Image (spheres, rainbow, N blue to C red):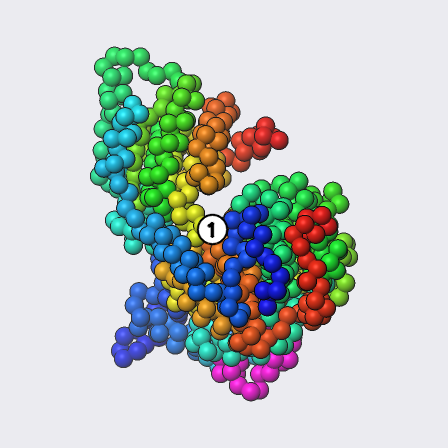
Amino acid sequence: MSEALDRSGLRAYTNARVALRSTGTSLATSEQLDLALCLAEARDAVHAELSTVTLVPRLTALGLEVLAVRSAARDRAEYLRRPDLGRRLSVASRAELQEPTQGQQQALNGAPAPTPPSLAIVIADGLSAIAVERHAIPVLEMLLPMLDKWQAGPVAVAEQARVAIGDEVGEVLGASATLLLIGERPGLSAPDSLGAYITWAPRVGRSDAERNCVSNIRPEGLSYEAAARKIAGYLNQARRLQLTGVALKEEQDQLEQ
Amino acid sequence: MPYRHTIRGITYAFESLRDLLARASPPRSGDELAGIAAASAAERVAAQMALADLPLSEFLHEPVIPYEQDEVTRLIMDSHDRGTFVPLGSLTVGEFRDWLLSEEATGDLLAGLARAFTPEMVAAVSKLMRLQDLVQVARKIRVVSRFRTTVGLPGTLCSRLQPNHPTDDPAGIAASILDGLLFGAGDAVIGINPVSDNVATVTTLLRMVDRIRERYRIPTQSCVLAHITTQLKAVERGAPVDLLFQSIGGTEKTNASFGVNLALLDEAYEAGLELRRGTVGKNVMYFETGQGSALSANGHHGVDQQTCEARAYAVARRYQPMLVNTVVGFIGPEYLYDGKQILRAGLEDHFCGKLLGLPMGCDVCYTTHAEANDDDMDALMTMLGVAGVNYIMGVPGADDVMLNYQSTSFHDIAYLRAALELRPAPEFEAWLEREARMELTLQGLLNA
């Protein structure tokens, strides 16, 4: 239909799938197979399990205290059908989190309570464990030095988890804010996109309008450094305004403009 | 009031009309998530049998969400055309299905009765229908809308060209527009979902598409699908707004979650009409909907997701829209689990919309976490084509690189037109036949 026209140059301007090769009105075989591979990779990403075994030592190496937790969803099949369960900790994980952490134990033993606001960090598999495994550590490596006005940690590594699980983790830990890094829903062109959610005063039942989000973190999208700067910006604003969500976003947008 | 049905000595009871509708609904994950689905396959059929015996007039006596609590219920009740409903009033839901499928119920007759039907009536009858019934009735009804093109004529299939880009980059968007136009897509609208919901972005993108349209004299309309309040601000600042877009749902609470209500939509409609930018007609509104949005917003009041969806069409038809489409598989597997559920939902939505008098299109789509793939999309788009859908989406390679979901491609539109012998909108077809496309270049688009 349009083969007479040269469309090959279009690809330089967008990562959208323009200028695909056709046969008749249909896609050429190689294009069809390429799309099939991209879908296969995205589907594999959705169903991949988070490798806590490799993640935990890398977090410990950053000087962070690490806690492994699970949501109330038993497996991926239940996770996909029951978002409500993915937003809550399992009974066992909640009980474990309620045990005083090392830091809190020291405080109980007579050390003064921390004056800077405390930040609970949650690393959640979400819909792409691959995104978490590839990008969570590099983002934290960039981010932690920017958080000098915070007491960062501990880190909860959460399986079968959705965004709102950060509310319960933060609440149980008594944190001033939660930073949650989570695997976003894979697209055909981005199976490993990481999202970051910042919630001030995390409590079970917070709505999504009460948090801020930094999306599409991956080398081909928002770089680690740019993402870390945005996250730190939101956190520092949140500390000043004592809130997150729509009101904070509008301020941040004005700053960026 | 309670309803009951007895099968082989077992009596199934349903505590309200809302409960009866939910339990009569063909299975889907969203109703299960809400805890309102039938507990067994037999209970579902018992509910369908009880529903089949129910007079249509019952829906006027027992709103599924109280009149006092919900402005969408008030809209449905207050705009119901009791005069044309009189001859239908004695039918049961089962008899209504039989009549819809009979030769007596012609497309013209059905189109004239649109305001006699309420969303709950058409949702109810759809629950007694197989997929072929949903196709058979919908294909009788043509709902035609006009702005610069005429969409919905018999024998045509139009498309929304959806040139989204992950950073709203004008050159990237122009590249996708060019690719789509070369394939004959874009006669329903060139509609961009922006990443940034602000007036500056909306205005920049609208100006670009408008210049392209003017330079190459392309008969179509444009839209940047930001929040309606952002689009209204762009109108105030003189941006070239053709169609005004908004996502809507079937309850007041769902609409509140989208940041809209009827008063705001009324205001937008008036503003759109005043622009007078259409050349062949003045349908100025564009709405998107989708099963599951009410539950997602915790605004479903125990009403099943398909009935909530049909109620959204009562909101849409208040504004004589140019375009309405369900974004059927976008919401995810917790609402529509797999290809089978998406297929049925897409055909239900198209059927209900057409019966209620809407120019229905469909975003035939799925996400990577649903149990679906291209084969399921092929089945849905082909059945919708047979059912006479007004338009589908055109996304490069069906891969939306901004919204991260799989829709339909420029190739899919070409396939459907070829397989079912369907043509573009007449104004757009005339432009295609002039071979004006041969003049298109990316530099030309960017410098338009």
Tell whether position A242 is magenta: no
Q: Nearer the viewer, residue B220 or B63?
A: B220
Q: Position of residue B255 (x, y in %)?
A: 55, 51
Q: Position of residue B30 (x, y in %)?
A: 39, 58
Q: Amino acid at mark 1?
A: Asn
Q: Residue at x 58, y 52 (%)?
A: A9
Q: Residue at x 44, y 75 (%)?
A: B131
Q: Position of residue A51 (x, y in %)?
A: 26, 41
Q: Which residue is mark 1?
A: B404
Q: Nearer the viewer, residue A34 or B11?
A: A34
Q: Residue at x 29, y 54 (%)?
A: A77
Residue B422 position (above or below residue B296)? below
* Chain letter of disc 1 in the image: B
Left or right for B196, reference A189:
right
Residue B60 position (above or below residue B197)? below
Instruction: Report the quarter where the N terminus of chain B lies.
Output: bottom left
